Image (cartoon, helix red, strand yellow):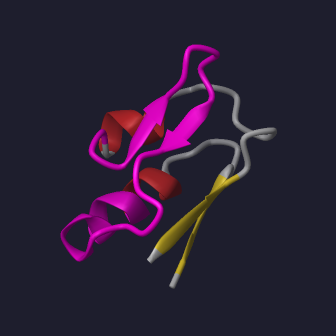
Amino acid sequence: MRIDADRDRCEGHGLCADVAPEVYDLDDDAVVVVRHETVPPELERKADAGARVCPVAALRVTS
């Protein structure tokens, strides 16, 4: 599983990092950072949950 982050679309709400801090973080400019190039299997559910709560749909989970 991979996560595509549209950093231009990100508004820095941080909900993804609240839901899945093992997968998502915000940089100093409050823009999403994905912690893993490929999400480990044990974090896939959290990665998906974090992507789903993004209010501006800046995160897309792909297989």
- Which residue does the image show at 31% across and 70% down from the upper left? 44
In the displayed orientation, state which residue is furthest to the bottom: 63
Q: How many marks?
A: 0
Residue farthest to the front, as pictured: 37
Q: Quadrant of the N terminus?
A: bottom left
Q: Is residue 23 left or right of residue 60?
A: left
Examine the rendered structure and indicate whether residue 59 appears above or below residue 33: below
Q: Indicate the quadrant where residue 40 lies.
A: bottom left
Q: Residue at x 72, y 41 (%)?
A: 7
Residue 36 figure quarter: bottom left
The structure residue drawn at horizontal position 37% and vertical position 67%, both measured from the top left corner, is 39
Left or right of 57 on screen, residue 51: left
Question: Residue 5 in the image: x percent, y percent?
Answer: 64, 52
Q: Is residue 55 magenta?
A: no
Q: Inspect the magenta stretch and tell me whether residue 32 lies in it.
A: yes
| Residue 1 drawn above or below residue 50 | below
Q: Residue furthest left?
A: 42
The spot of residue 4 in percent (x, y) is: 63, 62
Name the foreground residue: 31 vs 53.
31
Location of residue 29 with respect to 18 vertically, above or below: above
**Residue nearer the viewer, 62 or 40:** 40
What segment carries the magenta color? 21-48
* Residue drawn at (70%, 43%) of the image: 56
Residue, far top: 28
Query: Residue 21: where, in percent of width, then height?
Result: 30, 39
